[in-house]
């Protein structure tokens, strides 16, 4: 996992209070809705933490696309690269 992917995993683990999992053991391709069970409120909370951490805004319209840790990390990296 790259640095962003690891940090996104840490944030999700902390925010969802997941036990017995670390960023290194968290499957970055696991579907967060279907397999982890996050809901729209969880995703909104995670988006706020990511905004504070990275200084980016995650559009609500993009939430349905952000289904895995890897996809979220790529989204963040793309936003940072494009300067959005």
Image: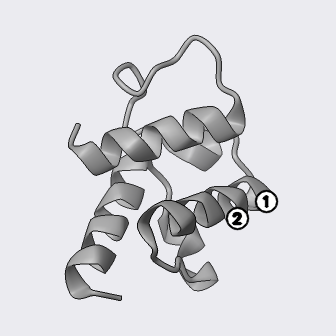
Which quadrant of the figure contains the C terminus?
bottom left
Image point (66%, 58%), residue name: 43
Residue displayed at 69% across by 36% down: 16
Q: Which mark is residue 76?
A: none
The local crowd at label 1, few if under 14, some if 14 to 19, many if 20 or more residues have their Cα within 10 Å, is: few
Residue carrying label 1? 41
The residue drawn where x is 58% and y is 71% is: 63
Query: Where, by quadrant of the figure, is residue 29 drawn?
Result: top left
Q: Are marks 2 and 1 in contact (CB under 8 Å)?
A: yes
Of 63 and 12, nearer the camera is: 12
Residue 18: give x, y in percent of width and height: 65, 25
Where is residue 68? Give x, y as percent. Answer: 45, 50
Quickly name the residue at label 2: 44
Task: Indicate the secondary structure of the residue bearing disc 2.
Answer: helix
Q: Residue furthest right?
A: 41
State the quadrant of the N terminus. top left
Q: Is residue 4 above or below residue 44?
A: above
Mark 1 residue element: helix
Cα gap from disc 2 to disc 1, whole angstroms: 5 Å
- Which quarter of the picture shows residue 9? top left
Nearer to me, 66 or 77: 77
- 33 relative to 79 in the view: left or right: right
Q: Position of residue 79 (x, y in %)?
A: 32, 78
């Amino acid at each position: 996992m790259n640095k962003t992917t690891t940090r996104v995993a840490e944030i999700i683990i902390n925010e969802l209070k997941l036990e017995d999992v670390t960023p290194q053991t968290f499957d970055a391709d696991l579907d967060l809705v279907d397999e982890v069970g996050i809901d729209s409120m969880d995703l909104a909370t995670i988006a706020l933490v990511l905004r504070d951490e990275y200084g980016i805004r995650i559009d609500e319209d993009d939430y349905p696309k952000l289904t895995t840790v890897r996809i979220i990390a790529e989204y963040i990296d793309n936003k940072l690269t494009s300067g959005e």
